[in-house]
Every structure is written in C-alpha cells, then in structure tokens.
Image (cartoon, rainbow, N blue to C red):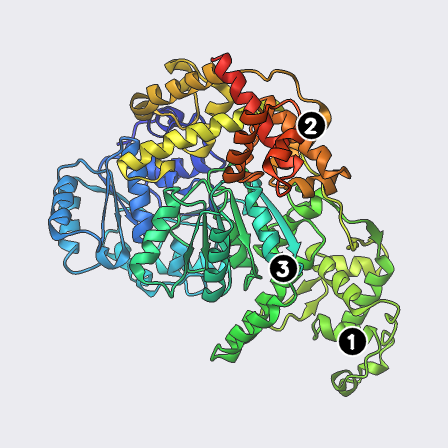
Amino acid sequence: MYQPTPLETYLKQYFGYDTFRPGQRQIIEEALQNRDLLAVMPTGGGKSLCFQLPALLKPGLTVVVSPLIALMQDQVDTLLNNGIGATFLNSSLEWEAVRSREREILQGRIKLLYIAPERLLSESFLPFLESARSRVGISAFAVDEAHCVSAWGHDFRPEYRQLKVLRQRYREIPVFAFTATATKRVREDICTQLNLNNPRIYIASFNRPNLYYEVKRKNRQSYNQLLQAIRAQKGSSGIVYCLSRRKVDEIAFRLEKDGISCLPYHAGMESEKRIDNQNRFIRDDVQVIVATVAFGMGINKPDVRFVFHYELPRNLEGYYQESGRAGRDGEPANCILFYSPGDKPRIDYLIDQKPDENEQRLARQQLNQIIDYVEGTECRRTIQLRYFGERFSGNCDNCDNCRNPQPIEDWTIEAQKFLSCVARCREKFGMTHIIDVLRGSSKKRVLDYGHHLLSTYGIGKDRSADEWKHLSRSLLHQGLLNETNDGYRVLKLNKKSWQILKKVRSVSIAVPQTTTKTTKADKNPRQIEVELLFDRLRLLRKNLADAQSVPPYVIFADSSLRVMARQQPQTREEFAKVPGVGARKLERYGDRFLSEIREFARERKPPVQVASDTQMTTFGLYQQGLNIEEIARERGLRPSTITSHLSELIEMRQPIDLDCLVSPERQKAIVAAIEKVGEKALTPIRDALGEEYNYEEIRLTRSRWRREKEDEEEPF
C-alpha cells in the first residue's frame, strides 16, 4: 500500500522538477486513494504526470489507453529516458517484440503499459490482461484523450465506447479519465460512457498564459507577411496550418525556396511519407511543418514556439486546440492567425458539402463565432475562455488587443437601442435581423414580421452595419448579451442586459482604428549571450538525441536549456538544481552539458567596446527578422545609417549573420579585393570590384574581415 511521503521528493527524483504545476498535486493525491476521477486540463498543463507518478508509487501495472501510435511511442521514450519502466503494444511491433514486452510485464519490470482501445479489449489480449492482474496486479486504467469517448467531443472515436467493459470486468480497479477540452455535456458523457463510479471531477482553467495571441489582417502580400513572421522566430520550431492540401503544398514549396527548412503534412500524402515528415519535424531535422488539421492530436512535441494559421480556422474550439500545440512546455510561444474576409467563402463551400442540414447550421454558427473572434477588439482570452464557459477579467497583457488597445468609447446609448430592439423582436432573431431593423431596412423578412412598425425601426441609421456588428460582438464578449448555441444564434437578454436598459449599467467598447502602432522590444547584450548559449545547448541536445534515435525534448525540455543558459551552472551540484534534471539525467548527461557551458564561457570574449543605444535599437530590430530597408523605415533613418550600425556591431563581435546580408559568393570576391588593395578606404575596393558591387555590402564584409584578422592576431 502507498505510504505517504512528500510527493515533491519523487517528483524531483523521477522527473527532475521541484514543484507541481497547478492542480497536479490534488489530482495525484486523489489517484493514490484509488478512486475514479475525470481531469480536464489544458494542453501543456501536465496531464500525463498525473497518472505516471501514481503508477510509480503504487504496486502493479498501470494500463494507459492511448489513441495514437505516435503518442504512445513519444511518452514511452520520455519515460525510459527518465529511467522509468514503460512500454507500449500496438500494430507497429513484430510478433516477437510483442511477446518480449509481455514477458517484461509479467516479470514486474514495467510500471506503465500504453495500449490502444481496440487491442486492450480484443479477445486475444484479455487473457493476457488477466495473467498480468494475477501475477503483478493492475493498479489503474488511465484513459488519455478521454473526449474521444463522447459523440459530442471534437474527435469522437467509436472504439472508445467499448471501454465501459473495463468497469464491468474490473470493478475494484480505479479508472482515470484525462482530456484537454470538454464542455459540460462532454464531461457528463465521459462519466456515463466509462461507467465512472462517483468520480472526483477536476476542471482546470483553459487559460494558457504563456501563449501570445494575435490576429493579422492579410494584405496583398500575405505570403510575405507569413515569411517575415517565421523569420522573426529565429529558427524555432513551428507549425503553419492551412485549410487545403493544395495550399499546404504551395506554402511549403515557397518557404523551402525562401530558405525556411520545412516539410508538408496532409491526408493526401502517402502514409509512410507523412509519418516520416512528422518524425523529422519532431526530431528538429526541419524547423517548420506546414499542415492541414490532419496534423493534430498525438503530436507531443513540447517545444513548438509558434503556431501560425495562414487561413481562417473552421471554428473556435478547433483554433484553441491547434494553437494550443504551441508552448506545451510552459515557455512563451506565439500564435498568429492571418485573416482575410476572403477566407469565409471557402469555408462556406466546405460547409455546403455536409449532407445534413442541422450539421450545416451548427457549422455556420461555429464559423460566425471564429469571425467574431478575429474581428473582436476585446482581450482574445476573454473571447476564447467565454466559449468554454469560463470567465476571464480581460487585460491579459499577452494578446494584440491588450498590448495595443484600441480607444475606448462610451456606447451606452447605442447598446440601449440595440438591446431594446432585441426585446421588441421578442428575443427570437439573430444579429443580422436586429441590425436590419435598427437601420430601417425594407427587406421582405423585416416587413413580413411587421418589424417596420416597431418603435426601434430605423433608430440606428446613424451607424453603419459594421459598427452595429462590432457593438453586438462586444456585448456578447463582455457577457452583456447571450445567444443560443443551436446553430441559429438567436440573441437573448440576460440580467446585465436589463441593467443596461434600466440605465444602471454603462457600456464601453474598444473602437477599431484603421492603423495600429506596433512596438519593438530591444534586446540587451546579456539577453543575446543567453540566446547564443541556448542555441549551443540545443545543438548538443540534437546530437545526443540523434545518437539515441529519440526526439530532442526527451533529453531536456527547452525550459531546462533556458535555465542552463541563464544560470550557466559550473558544477554537478549546480546542474542538479536545474528544473527537469532528475537523478538519471544528471548521471547520463550532466558532464556533457557542463563541458559545453564551460567552453562557451571560455570562448565568450567581451566586445571591444560597448554598443550605443541607437546601435542596440537597430540590433534589436535585426534580431526580430527585419532587413536593412525595413529597419530603416521603422526607425526613420537612411539604409546607409543602418548599414553602418550593423558594420560596427559586427566588429564588436555581436551575433550578426553576414550571410543573410551579403551572399557568400560576393563576400569571397570582396575579401579578395580587400587583400589586394587594402582595407582602409572603401573606394579603391569598389574600383577593384566594379560597379555591380555597392558600398554597403563592402562595408559589412570588411567589418567581419577586420574582426577575423584581429582574432588571428589575438587568439583566445
């Protein structure tokens, strides 16, 4: 029987962390009491640890039901790297491998078994499960991705329905259900379908505070917008979602042509190629995967630093799921949705292909909800979390609307007009009809219902239809108005609506402006040094992972590498304090990473001089992926001035990638001219090269040549 001991001790020993994430300890304590439970925790909230740690502390085998082969293998690789006995059984294994793993289970060497529902409940496997129960015992069944049980979930899988057999056959064994998203209806269905016995239900916040949300309106050069956004990520791993297979192939081709290491992924590809592309992305062989929503559940890569949607998603829940694949490790990540009104007709076409009219109606409501999101001026989190029934106060300071707020105006009178019209139309119509009445439309539907005779008819002619739509969305996002969720989107008044109508509550809304000013964050030399060491540690991690044929994050998470880069531990004792460094990883990798950190410290020669504020401002913009012309426009300076800044920074040994500014071939010709005529003056060098070379590229190349010459004369 489990003996109470500080759980944090085991957490550090097995997983390398000193403290639990919010909610984890409570769920683990419930699991250790052998009671059924349902936990709804957002992606990146640490669901897996909630059944993995209890499995280690209780006698016997924990059986984990998982829907995807890739998900099983990924979690088993991570557990094995932590020195934990784990395995999986699925169709990817040969017969001999299955028998070998079954022997290990019966010998008590395995604590966690990952298995698909079909195999778990098959007639051929159930006798083995009985043997495992009698020989080593079964401590729990953990159902991962439990929303697959419910027909109301976003990824229903009929085979999951069979899992109710577990309760019938093993009444004394607790069942744990885990999922990232589930509405109240889905939660109830999960409990019913799995026959959970008086389960303890834990619902965590859907808020992912580490994710930055932004909506960018596409311009005519939308591909260039995407390319610039990816370049600003400085080589970090990311996903680009597109609606169609054709668009996936097109964007992947163009990005590869423009120097972005990427691969496509969609259901139209051959299975082997699709799996290979997925694995190459997971193992950091490429920076970007361009995909349809076929690339989704089961991608357990925690260090995805950005998820960009190049086209409008079909619904808000899908967008939350897809964007949530960024930053699973809790580190900052960027989620940008590129939006154009032209995206809507394409989704309308897809909806028209649905055979059932009710499905079409619900799909259109979901489409309108995502449009409300992208065109909304309130805090993005407020809109997202309200969809899941969670209240959020707003002003998250980590979305575009909160960081660059639009001017706030008092629209109480307009709100009273709008809500009054909803009331006089007897709360039986949607936004479009209410706006038609307010603006005095002579549409047949308005006349047929006699709404041209209402006192609110035509009282809103002073505002455009778009302004009324914006008000309606703001009222919904602020919880000042409700709408039905049956596909018809009928507006309904609530308690706060009546407070507005009775003039005891005012209404303020953010009014969209035609232009918004963006701010650029500068980086100081210390931040740059940390990023340089982080990149070095990532490369070491990649080499170690390749040697073991595992994804890099199995070695260490990005969050652990960032702490190493900031703190630069010099001893094993210091290294052991880094989050994610458990006993097994300290012994296995400590010396390699310490050696790399010490070598970096020896090599890091301080700049010859301290960069000025104006130079560092230029450098900060360069670090964000802007080219010389873009930096000059941003700062209101001439390109030649920006070139001078970058040249001086190169000589100061700041990390400027010259190859991105001057092609290696032209650098070679410039260096040859410098060595022939000398480096003191630019004009003789240009004369030797010819008019096809400009002074800017000569100045930049000369700066690196000077730095390299100095390094040769004064080695470290």
Q: SS class of the residue under badge 1? A: helix
What amino acid type should be assigned to the residue bearing mark 3? Tyr
- Reading the chain from its start, which is encountered first: label 2 or label 1? 1
Q: Amino acid at mark 2?
A: Gln
Look at discs 2 and 1 and give the one toward the viewer.
Answer: 2
Depth check: 80 or 169 in front? 80
Q: Is residue 292 left or right of residue 593?
A: right
Q: Residue at x 49, y 78 (%)?
A: 353
Task: Identify the residue under disc 2.
Answer: 615
Query: Element under label 2?
Result: helix
- x and y, in percent, of residue 59 in the image: 23, 35
Q: Label 2, label 1: how many angstroms apart (C-alpha)?
A: 56 Å
Quadrant (top left/top right/bottom left/bottom right) for the N terminus: top left
Q: Residues within 10 Å of mark 2 (few under 14, many from 20)?
A: some
Determine which residue is flagged by label 3. 339
Residue occupying image coordinates x 71% and y 35%: 640
Task: Say which residue appears at 69% left-offset and 30% top-offset.
Answer: 644
Q: Amino acid at mark 1?
A: Asp
Sequence-first disc among 1 and 3: 3
Q: Residue at x 47, y 46 (%)?
A: 43
Can residue 696 be spotted in the picture? yes
